[in-house]
Image (spheres, rainbow, N blue to C red):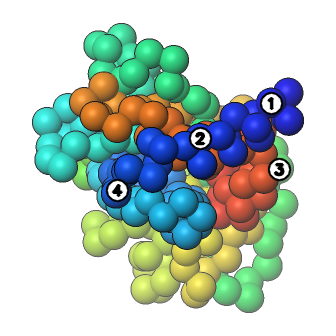
Amino acid sequence: MGRVLTAALLALLTSPVLAQTAEINVLAPGVVYNAGLVDLAAAYARETGVKVTVKSDGMAAIVNDIKKAAPIADVIVLPVAFMDGMEAESGIVAGSRSDLGRVRVGLAVKKGAAHPDISTPAKLASVLKTGVVLYSNPASGSMEARIINDMLRRYPVFAGVRSRISIKGEGGEALVRGEGDMALQLACEVLNHPEIELAGLVPDELGAYIDTAVAVSARSAQGPAAGAFIAYITRPENTALWKSRGLDRN
């Protein structure tokens, strides 16, 4: 199967379609934009000569922008639930959708601080209760912030956790400013701040993660070229890069 996929990708990369394509536009939420997408777009441009413009969009606006904004996004990246809706509305090209991967919420600590064991809900709760926990503002429309907020309130094990919502920027940014002792933040965003470190990932049974998918937009006039880009970013050789940026393709 791997040889078949590789052969198909090579055919796409050397096809006349790509030679005639000057640029493709990609629209993605921060959860994927910050997890290696920009690096892969640059590598793809170097290999093919096709310019790839990647734009990040907030969760509150991204679906509307996919449907109406200009320039048209040829490739769209969305959380799985959002992509399900786009597919139901025929907003993506049939058969072009691929699962991209999962980005988990992690615990951020100040650089050089100990990395505590948070491998179970009980251990995570015990650590969180040792200080003030920062996270992004749910009122901003952030899917990540809503997931964290819901987790802290849904499970009794987190009763007594002292949390503080960051009014200015993400929880990790508030931690950098010294507004608390630790932060809950998507792993890909923690890794982008050299002043803080990823101590560990929240256990999957708490549901603190975002699963993502990628597809060709039905508005795109460059379907084959957009499909070639998707084939490139999802090939097995790029799994390690995604993982190093906080997105797990497994």
Q: Position of residue 118 (x, y in %)?
A: 78, 55
Please give the residue where the numbered disc 3 appears in the rendered image. 119
83 left or right of 67? right
Q: Secondary structure at mark 2?
A: helix
Mark 1 and mark 2 lie on one chain; the one further toward the N terminus is 1
Q: Which mark is residue 4?
A: 1
Is disc 4 surrounded by few (<14), some (14 to 19) or many (20+) residues within 10 Å? some
Amino acid at circle 4: Glu
| CA gap, disc 3 and disc 4 | 44 Å
Q: Which mark is residue 23?
A: 4
| CA gap, disc 1 and disc 2 | 12 Å
Let me know if residue 23 appears in the view: yes
Q: Secondary structure at mark 4?
A: strand
Residue at the spot 39% in from the left edge and 32% down from the top edge:
223
Residue at the spot 43% in from the left edge and 86% down from the top edge:
177
Please give the residue where the numbered disc 2 appears in the rendered image. 12
Residue 232 vertical placement versus 243 (above, below)? above
| CA gap, disc 1 and disc 3 | 38 Å
| CA gap, disc 2 and disc 3 | 42 Å
Q: Position of residue 84 (x, y in %)?
A: 43, 19
